[in-house]
Image (cartoon, coloured by chain):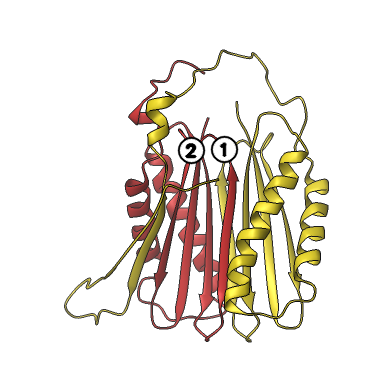
């Protein structure tokens, strides 16, 4: 696999990815209030949109997109991640989004091929 | 893993004038340490001409590890913000170390852990991946006791 140019084109660009995530989340659940029967569809939509936009970047990356939607109820939530990869080419980006009734946390991990 | 910088920024969005600004988005991301680039330019590996991994990712073993770790660390604990904050970091490091010990060659590992308080709230965790389904896989395990729940996921991605 050495016909790709090494350098900026094959590094994980965090800003670009975080913009994509923000847009996907706004688009999928923008003005909605938490509804238990719709959450399933919302997580799927957020993740699908994120992944579609990421593939359009046409970079030689494998992506893992995770979305957590939680109702605002005074409960606490802690998330941590630990990764074993190549620091120079791989990266991750996490975006926390909230509105009056729910939290949405989206993480994208990009692993170079 | 040492993270060189943890940067976070927050701002309120005011999408259009009619809709009241009700959504706030906070972006937090880890800055990949770029200082290593000067010392080690990205390594170009030779072709291995391997079509598929020699040893596959052992899903059931990893699941066992997850179950083990979650039970050992969380069985007796009550939910407390400070404790759980430390606990998530510790558990994710421990899981990563144990999966690394399995020595599965050419596999990159991502370990994700969520610990939350049980408060009759609703929660949904979803994930989707763009990868090679023949070689890449994941293992997940959840755990619950009287006051908290935990969900651990390990993704194994083959490096071609």
Which residue corresponds to mark 2?
A: A90
Residue at the image position 58 percent from the left and 75 percent from the top: B82
Distance, label 1 to label 2, CA atoms, is: 7 Å
Q: Is residue B9 left or right of residue A86?
A: left
**Chain A colour in the picture:** red
Residue at the image position 59 percent from the left and 65 percent from the top: B125
Secondary structure of the residue carrying tag 1 is: loop
Residue at the image position 46 percent from the left and 69 percent from the top: A104
Q: Residues within 10 Å of mark 1 (few under 14, many from 20)?
A: some
Residue A85: give its label. 1
Q: Quadrant of residue A23?
A: bottom left
Q: Is residue A27 left or right of residue B146?
A: left
Contact, CB < 8 Å: mark 1 with mark 2? yes
Q: Position of residue A51 (x, y in %)?
A: 46, 49
Say if residue A58 shows up in the picture: no
**Chain B colour in the picture:** yellow
Q: Position of residue B30 (x, y in %)?
A: 43, 51
Q: Is residue B31 left or right of residue B12?
A: right
């Amino acid at each position: 696999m050495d016909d790709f140019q090494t350098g900026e084109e094959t590094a994980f660009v965090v800003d670009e990815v975080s913009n994509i995530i923000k847009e996907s989340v706004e688009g999928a659940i923008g003005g909605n209030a938490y509804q238990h029967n719709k959450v399933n569809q919302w997580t799927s939509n957020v993740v699908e949109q994120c992944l579609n936009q990421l593939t359009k970047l046409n970079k030689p990356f494998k992506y893992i997109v995770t979305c957590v939607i939680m109702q605002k109820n005074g409960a606490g939530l802690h998330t941590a991640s630990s990764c074993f990869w190549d620091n120079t080419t791989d990266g991750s980006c996490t975006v926390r989004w909230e509105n009056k009734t729910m939290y949405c946390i989206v993480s994208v991990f990009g692993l170079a091929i | 893993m040492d993270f060189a910088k943890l940067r976070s920024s927050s701002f309120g969005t005011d999408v259009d004038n009619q809709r009241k600004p009700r959504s706030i988005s906070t972006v937090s991301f880890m800055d990949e340490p770029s200082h290593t680039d000067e010392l080690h330019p990205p390594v170009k590996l030779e072709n291995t001409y391997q079509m598929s991994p020699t040893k596959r990712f052992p899903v059931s073993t990893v699941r066992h590890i997850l179950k083990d770790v979650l039970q050992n660390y969380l069985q007796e604990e009550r939910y407390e913000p400070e404790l759980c904050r430390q606990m998530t970091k510790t558990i994710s490091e421990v899981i990563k170390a144990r999966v690394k010990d399995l020595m599965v060659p050419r596999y990159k590992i991502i370990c994700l852990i969520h610990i939350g308080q049980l408060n009759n709230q609703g929660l949904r965790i979803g994930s989707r991946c763009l990868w090679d389904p023949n070689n890449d896989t994941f293992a997940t395990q959840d755990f619950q006791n009287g006051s908290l729940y935990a969900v651990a996921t390990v993704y194994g991605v083959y490096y071609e």
